[in-house]
Image (tube, rainbow, N blue to C red):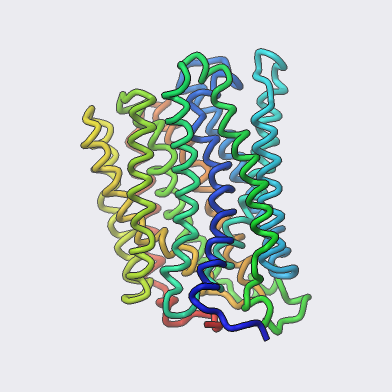
Amino acid sequence: MPPEMTDGSRLRAVIAGSAGNLVEWFDWYTYSAAALYFAPIFFPKGDQTAQLLQTAAVFAVGFFARPIGAWLMGLYADRAGRKAALTASVTMMCVGSLVIAVTPGAATIGVAAPLILVLARIVQGLSLGGEYGVSATYLSEMAGRRHRGFWSSFSYVTLIGGQLCALAVLIVLQHALTAGQMKAWGWRIPFASGAMLAVVAFWLRRRMQESQSFVTADASRSQRGSIRQLLGRYPREVAIVLGLSAGGSLLFYVYTTYMQKFLVNTAGFSKDEATEISALSLFVFMAAHPLCGWVSDKVGRRPMMLVAFGGATLITWPVMTGVAGTRSFTVALCLICGALLIQSCYTSISAVVKAELFPTALRTLGVALPFALANAIFGGTAEYVALWFKSIGAERGFYVYAMVLAALGFVVVLSMRDTSRFSRITED
C-alpha cells in the first residue's frame, strides 16, 4: 500500500505537478502573446487583420492536434502512469518552443517559415492535448476529498500563471527593447526561455510521486485507457465534458487570449496598453481560483458552474461592446476583470468536475479526449472566428456566438448531478 497522504505530501505533489503545467502553458501562450510582433515575420503580406488572421489559423492548427495528443497521452497515462505521461508531454513542448525560437522568417527561407511554424505548433498541440487531462487527473487524485476543489484549482492557477508569465516577459521586453528590436528578434526570447524552463520542469516531474489512485487501481491493463470502454460505458459523462468545455473553452480564450488583439484591433488601444490590461486582468483571474475552488468544497460544484455559465450568457454582449466603445484603460480593465471573475466559477473547478465523472482506469482519457475535442473546435478557433466576423463587417455576430455557447453550458449544468457528492474518485 502507498503511504498515507499528509497535507505536506499533498502540497509537494501539487507543486511538482503544477510547476510543469505552468511551463507548458507559458510555452503555449507565448505564441499568442508575441503574435502581434512575429505575424509580419512569418506572414508578410496583407494588413494587420490579415496577418493576425493567418497567425490565428496556425494557432487553431495547434488546437486540432490536441485531440490526438489527448488520445495518445490519455492511453499512456492510464496504462503507464500519470508521472510518465507528464514527463513526456513537457519534453515535446520544449522541442516545439525551441524550433519556433530558431526558425528564420519568410524573408529568409520563404514559404518554409510558416510551414515550420505549423509543424512546431502541431508538436506543441500534441503535448498540450495530453497535459491538461493528465495534470487535471493527477492534481484531482492527489488532492483529498475535503479540499479537492481547492487543491485542484491550481491546475488553472498555473495554466493562467503560464499565460501571465508569457505576458510579463513580453512587457519586460517591450520596455527593455525598441520596437524595431522587438520586431526583428526580441519576440524570439520568450520561446527560447520556454524551452530552457521545460528542461527544469522535466527534472521536477522525474521526481514526482505517482498518484495513489493509479497505484491502487485494480483494473486490468487491457481495460485502462480504452476508447471502446469509455464510449460504451460512459457516453453521458463524455457528452457532459464536451458540453461544458465548448462554452468554457471559448469564453476562456475570448477573455484571456483574443482580448489582447481585440483591444488593439477594435478598441484602438496601443500594443503596450493592451498587453498591460491583459496582464492585470489575468492576475485578478488567477488569484480568484483558489477561493472559488475552496467555495466549491463548501457549496458544491453545480452552483458555481450555474453562476459561471448563466452569468456569461448575460454579460458577454455588454462587456464586449463596452470594451469596444471605450478608450479608458480603467474601464476596459474593470469590464474584463468582471467577466473573468464570473468565468472563474467554472475554470477553478473545471479539472476536478471532469475527473470526478470517471473511474481511475479511464479517468485521464475521459478528461482529456472530450475536452481536447471541444477545445479544438471552439477554443482553438475563437480568435479565427472573431477575426473572420470582423473581416466581413459583422463583429458583433461573434458576441452572439459566444452567448449561445455559454447558454449551452448552462443547460448542461442543469442536467447533471453535483460531482462533489457523487464523485468517482474514491481515494482520500
Q: Which residue is drawn at the image coordinates 51% and 30% (left, top)?
A: 34
Which residue reaches farthest front? Answer: 8
In screen coordinates, is 131 left or right of 380? Answer: right
In screen coordinates, is 243 left or right of 301? Answer: right
Where does residue 228 sit, x and y in percent of width and height?
Answer: 70, 71
Q: Which residue is drawn at the image coordinates 53% and 51% (left, top)?
A: 22
In screen coordinates, is 13 left or right of 349? Answer: right
Compared with 415, 131 (above or below) is: above
Q: Is residue 48 visible?
A: yes
Which residue reaches farthest bottom? Answer: 1
Image quarter for residue 125? top right
Looking at this view, is 242 or 117 the one in front? Answer: 117
Image quarter for residue 132? bottom right
Looking at this view, is 381 or 154 the one in front? Answer: 154
Q: Which residue is drawn at the image coordinates 72% and 58% (left, top)?
A: 72
Where does residue 134 sit, x and y in percent of width and height?
Answer: 61, 62
Q: Which residue is drawn at the image coordinates 68% and 35% (left, top)?
A: 98
Compared with 176, 180 (above or below) is: above
Q: Is residue 373 visible?
A: no
Locate the N terminus and report the quarter of the image it occupies: bottom right
- Number of marks: 0
Compared with 132, 108 (above or below) is: above
Where does residue 417 sit, x and y in percent of width and height?
Answer: 41, 77
Where does residue 374 sit, x and y in percent of width and height?
Answer: 53, 54
In screen coordinates, is 272 left or right of 5? Answer: left
